[in-house]
Each structure stands twice: as C-alpha cells, then as structure tokens.
Image (tube, rainbow, N blue to C red):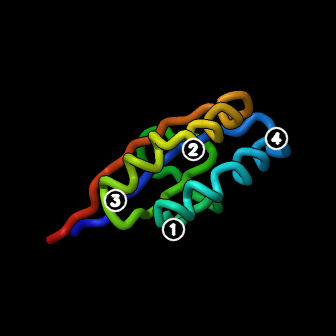
Amino acid sequence: MAKAYWVAHVDVSDPEAYEDYKAANAAPFAEFGARFVVRGGDQEVREGQVRNRTVVIEFPSYEAAVACYESPAYQAAVDIRKNVSIGDMVIVKGYDG
C-alpha cells in the first residue's frame, strides 16, 4: 500500500501562537501514524513562488492522511492555525512503483 503525504507551504504571522497549533496537532498526528519528513528549515526557491515554511508529513496510507485531516482533533488545531498563519496544503498519494 502506498504511503501518502501532506505537503504544505505556510507563512506564519505569529510564531509564538503557532506553537499552540503544533501542540494541538500532536495527538491526531500520533493517532493516524504521521511522521514529519520536512518541518520548516532552510530552503531555496529555484522555480516559481512558495511561502516561507515548507512542511511534508508522511502517513501510512492515503486513507489515514485524509482521516487525520478530517478528524475533530485536527480540525480543532486548524482553528488555532487559521488565526496565526496562511498556507496551501495538498494531500497526495505516494508513488508505489
């Protein structure tokens, strides 16, 4: 079964308050088997435009990735994040070649 990924590009306007979002997402991420592959860090934009922060989270399956996003616990975390950041996020099924 192919893994799946959340790929997000985010601009954080209040880094201190963003820590509350990170604390709130810990439980649903653990529940659905999430593993951070990229969590911010240095980046170089070589083509196009992206936001300041890139995050890639791996899930054991596409179904787990979608279920995590739709879970009440993660949606509570989203409510925190929306007030302190803007971003773009996609859930994508990994290549199982």
Amino acid at dot 4: Ala
Q: Please give the name of the residue rendered at 73% of the width and 33% of the height, measured from the top-left corner.
A: 84
**Quadrant of the snapshot with the C terminus:** bottom left
Where disc 4 sits, the SS reads helix
* Camera-side residue of 66 and 18: 66
Amino acid at dot 3: Ala
**Quadrant of the snapshot with the N terminus:** bottom left
- The percent position of residue 13, horizontal first and vertical second, equals 76, 34
Which one is earlier in the sequence, the residue at label 1 or at label 4? 4
Where disc 1 sits, the SS reads strand
Query: Which numbered circle lies on residue 4?
Result: 3
| Residue 85 quadrant | top right
Mark 2 to mark 4 CA distance (whole Å):
16 Å
- The percent position of residue 7, horizontal first and vertical second, equals 45, 50
Which one is earlier in the sequence, the residue at label 2 or at label 4? 4
Q: Which residue is mark 4?
A: 17
Q: Which residue is mark 2?
A: 74
Mark 1 to mark 2 CA distance (whole Å):
15 Å
Where disc 2 sits, the SS reads helix
Q: Please give the name of the residue rendered at 49% of the width and 63% of the height, measured from the top-left corner.
A: 34
- The percent position of residue 96, horizontal first and vertical second, equals 19, 69
* Camera-side residue of 10 and 22: 22
**45 left or right of 48 in image:** right
Amino acid at dot 2: Tyr
